[in-house]
Each structure stands twice: as structure tokens, then as C-alpha cells.
Amino acid sequence: MRDTYNTYQPLIMHIDLNSCFATVEQQARVVLRGKPVAVVNRRTDQTMIVTASYEAKAAGVKLGMKLRDARKLCPGLVGVESDPPKYRYVYHKLLDIMNDYSAHVTMKSIDEGVIDFTQAPQAIIDRGLENIGREIKQRLKDEIGTAMRCNVGIATNRFLAKTAASLHKPDGLDVITHENLRDVLGTLKLQDLTGIAERNAHRLESVGVMTPLDFLDTSASVLHNSVFKSIDGDKWHQRLHGWEVDDVAITTKRVGRQYVLDDFNLTFDEILQRLHHLCESVGWRMRKQGLSARGIYVGTRTFGMRGDKRRNYWHATHVSQTPFFSDATIYSLARHLFVNASPNIRDINVHVYLLQPHEQSQVSLFADEIARERSVVSAIDQLNDRYGEHTVHSADTLKTSPFVKTKIPFGSTRYL
Amino acid sequence: MNDEIFLNERIDVLAKFGTGLNPCVPIKFRRPNGREVVVTEIGLRHPTTQGKRAVHVFDVTDGAIDYRIELDSERLTWQLTRMGDAI
């Protein structure tokens, strides 16, 4: 455990395309520039806002707000339906640019990534990370478009680099070192720190830690024993002092999809068709990563009694002895669980877990049958690869494609 | 909510193919109704696929209205697929 500040040269760069989807839409559609724009997933007034442009945010529009409510705050708000291929293109362009500077690039989500320069060639480091940051900003404008802006943060660890990237939105470049750390933290509130939301802030305040500077000055033992009551307290102490604790590889533990029903008056059979579509999508994503699963989870959210949140949720799980991988098996298991779901369903959720490499399943007594199933699934996947996802699918999901569209997942870059 | 009109029109396009970061630059196009649109700015060009077929999507503007035109790289055809509604 190190109690001192990290005084090494800052070599971690965090790049963040804030309001990414809205900025990309304003880049693509020139007429929308300078106007308040909200990106939504469906063309209805009831839909939630996924991203808002800076102009919309200035008028009080927040993420998660219904478009109808946001229009009351900001009458000129333009709702634009999300366009995943466009965002994927910008994501890959940003990744290409970042890869030009270091072999150690990690994308944290579709709109932010980290470049680790600790093992970069000396010639690159000698150029100065601030110069490289400015060059990346310029390259974004040259290679994608003039409306593209990003925030760059530089520090000795990922946490402080992200904090630096959030200091001067939407087009900032800031460096946090051991010399200005106290000055920077002095300008922030507890909940401005990534990872400190309402609950953690309440925990800290209960022991008299009211500001980020108090947090910085609190000893590791107090954070461990009195605040977080776990090793998280030690990690926070290290993080705030500029030492790296977040450079960890994340493995896929489950693959899933959630869907808010397009109509709340659907029959049970129509909901089953949408569940079937989700199962096909989950199977496709899982096999794309070369995995099969042993566990399945099916959940729903329902219109329950007002004020009693427990009644609003239902879920069931099943763990199979042998791994499964085909859409037909996933749907068969999910359907078997789903017949017990509560009525008045609002959204459905399917996940597979206990994942393992697809090829390493044990040979069973039914090896021929499994081999045949694998051949059929592989042939269908090849056709869908060639002609587009959901080209060959069950007749049951023939009518569901217009409703169950693929959307961009925040926080994961596995399917991009 | 809907600020775009979805279309599926084959169009004649005058484009410049050159070098640099944007090797294909649409200059103007003519719609089936005879109306000619002069492109004043390309907002974004991004590739996408229809199955294995690569399609290049150009979001362009004539200064007043945004348009989306698509070049099918296999068939070498251009389509006008979207047009922004007046905002």
C-alpha cells in the first residue's frame, strides 16, 4: 500500500466523445448543427432520450427523459432516430486514430477509450502527451468531420485521466499531475467523481468526508474499515493518489438482450414471438464470440402495484448439465421458463450465462445429434454473415423485425 | 418526431473521384422528377453493408435541406434514400 502521491510522468490518456451520438448526427446532418438535438431509439414521443446535444443539455434536457417531456423544456428540440452504422463507423475511426500512437488502447465504451503510453516508444513520449492530444483532436476533425469534438484527459492513472477529461467539456484538454491534483479536486463535488453516486456519497458523508479533498486526505484504513468495508476502500485511496488499480481485463460473463414491448396490449403468442427474436439475437451474439452456455435467465418487468417495486419484476433461471448454443435450444428453454411469467408485461429480458468455449464441450451419448445441430447452426450463421443478420431465421419471427431492432449498447464494445 | 422522409429513388450523380481522405465527392445529383440538387457540403461518409455488399452512405446538404444518398459499390448505382424535412 502506497501512501504517497504518484509523482511519475502522466502517461495515461483518456479520450471521450461527449454527447457522441448527437454530435455524430450534427456532423452528418449539417442543418442540425447549432440546434438542440435528441437521439432516441424509436420514432415516438413516448421514447426515452439516449443522447442530447450540448444545445439541448443547456436547455435542461437530460438523458433518460421522455421526448415529450423534453419538448416542454425545449420546444425546438429535434428528435432523431439512432443510426448504429454511423456510430460504429465513428467508433472505428477513433480506434484507428488511437492505435496509431500506442499498442495499448482500451475502448471503455462506444464513445470513450484509453491510450496507455507507459510502454510506448520514447520518441512518441518525447513529443509530449499534450501535443499528441491536440493532434488527435485535429485528426478527428480532418478524418471524420469539422463538427467532431472530444475531451482529452491526461494523468498517471485511468481514474484521474477520466476526471481530467470531464473538466472542460465539450472540447477540453487537461492534465492532472501530483502538483495540481489538490487544486483540481478542490473544484469538484463528491458526485463529480466517476464511481461516486448517491449511495457512496452518503457513505462518505456519514464519516465526515464531504468533498473530494476530504476524500483524498482520508487514510486507507478509514476508507477500508469505516466507509467501504472492503478492499474497495484501499483501491479508492490508491486511485485518488494517482496509482493505477483499474487496468484489469474484463471477460464476458453473460450475453443477453432486453426489449421494451412495442405495444402493451400484445397477446401472449405475440410476446412469445418477440422473446423468440431476442433468443435468436442472443444466440447469434454468443456464437460470434465462439461461446456456448449452460445457464439461461428470463426476466420480465410488469405493470405492478404502484409503489411496490418487488411486484414489478419476475424472473426464472435454468442451468443445463450440457452446454447449448443453438437458437432453437435457447428459445425452447426460455419458453419453458416464460410460461410462468406474470401478466401485464412491460419488457422482457433474456440472458445466457456460465459461458464456455464453443468447441470444448464434452462428447455425449448424443454426439451425432449435436454434430448435426452444430452443422445446421453453422450453415445458418454463414448465410446470415453473408447476407446480413436475421436473413435466415425461424418463421415464428417473420413479423418481428420491424419492432425488435438492434441498438447500440452503451458500456460494451463487444459487438461493434 | 419524424423529421425525415424515407425515399428509394435511383438518381444520376456527378461525383469527383480523387485522392486524399475523401476520395469520392458527390457534386450534384438529379432526381427522377428532374430536380437538380447541388451539394454544398458532405456531412459524413460512412460505409455500411447490405449482406456482404458494401454500400457507401453520404449525408449531404444543399445548404437548406439534408439528403442521404447511397453508392452501391457492387452495382455502381446511386440511390436517394432520405431527405430532411423542413426544421
Image (spheres, coloured by chain):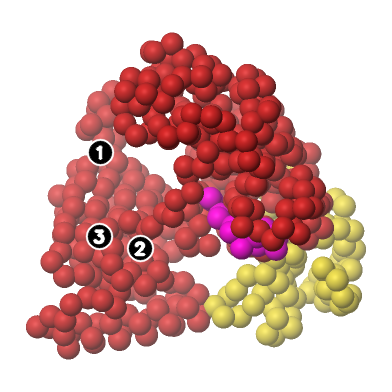
Q: Which mark is residue A200?
A: none
Q: Is residue A159 magenta?
A: no
Q: Residue at x 48, y 53 (%)?
A: A412
Q: Are marks 1 and 3 on the same chain?
A: yes
> Of label 1 and label 3, which has the lower sequence position?
1
Q: Is residue A233 left or right of residue B21?
A: left
Q: Nearer the viewer, residue A85 or A155?
A: A155
Q: Which chain is red?
A: A
Q: Which residues are magenta?
A: A97-109
Badge nearest the viewer, 1 or 3: 3
Sort mark 3 into few (<14), some (14-19) or many (20+) by Cα contacts within 10 Å.
Answer: some
Q: CA distance from mark 1 to mark 2?
A: 21 Å
Q: Is residue A282 above or below residue A60?
A: below
Q: Which mark is residue A354?
A: 3
Residue A16 seen in the current view: no
Indicate the position of residue B48 as horizontal and vertical percent values.
63, 70
Disc 3: host chain: A
**What is the quadrant of the N terminus of chain A in the image?**
top left
Report which residue position mark 2 lands on.
A282
